[in-house]
Amino acid sequence: MRKCLNPDCLYTNPDNSKFCQKCGNKLLLRERYYAEQILGQGGFGRTFLAVDEDKPSKPSCVIKQFFPEAQGTDTVQKASELFAQEAERLEELGKHPQIPDLLAYFTSEGRQYLVQEYIEGKTLPQGLEQ
């Protein structure tokens, strides 16, 4: 299934869809990545489990979508700067066994995105619960 990335839609579409059947939004980011499901969300964005269509093995990856719900231009501007800094720091760190690789950072349709390697396993809350 392919999840629409339009924050006002988030409709789940059939696998062969190129455009959202509900809102018409393009489903492939950069003609490469498509979202399958929401992994989490907070005040400044959503995280999706995704697929990299460019690689023969179609590996899973993670799309982080900057989507601030906060009010006020200063707050949104600062959050946008911090999101960009996250991408810069991930690139500076390079390959590290404890940090998912940064695959891409870009803006599409006025929204910022980070694409990172998907690492299967427990989430932090799940690990702490154990």
Image (spheres, helix red, strand yellow):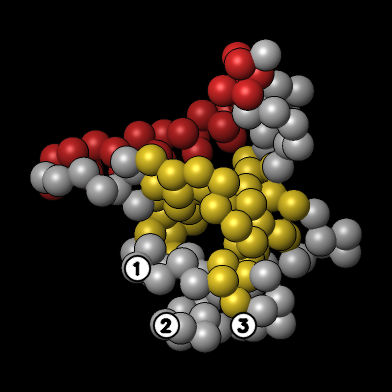
What amino acid type is highlighted by mark number 1? Asp
Residue 117 in the image: state x and y as whole percent: 70, 42
Q: Please report contact status of discs 3 and 1: CB closer than 8 Å, yes or no.
A: no
Residue 101 in the image: state x and y as whole percent: 68, 37
Q: Nearer the viewer, residue 103 or 23?
A: 23
**Mark 2 crowd level (few <14, some 14–19, many ≥20, 10 Å Cα):** few
Q: Nearer the viewer, residue 77 or 10?
A: 10
Residue corresponding to mark 1 = 8
Judge depth for marks 3 and 1 and give the one in front. Answer: 1
Residue shown at the point (52%, 81%) measured from the top left: 20
Number of the label disc, if any, that sits on residue 18: 3
Residue shown at the point (73%, 36%) measured from the top left: 119
> First in sequence: mark 2 or mark 3?
3
User: Is residue 63 visible to us here?
Assistant: no
Q: Is residue 45 above or below residue 96?
A: below
**Mark 3 crowd level (few <14, some 14–19, many ≥20, 10 Å Cα):** some
Secondary structure type for disc 1: loop
Separation (CA) of disc 2 from disc 3: 12 Å
Secondary structure type for disc 2: loop
Separation (CA) of disc 3 from disc 1: 18 Å
**Mark 1 crowd level (few <14, some 14–19, many ≥20, 10 Å Cα):** few
Residue corresponding to mark 2 = 23
Residue shown at the point (46%, 34%) measured from the top left: 86
What amino acid type is highlighted by mark number 3? Lys
What amino acid type is highlighted by mark number 2? Cys
Identify the residue at the far right of this view: 57
Secondary structure type for disc 3: loop
Q: Please report contact status of discs 2 and 1: CB closer than 8 Å, yes or no.
A: yes
> First in sequence: mark 2 or mark 1?
1
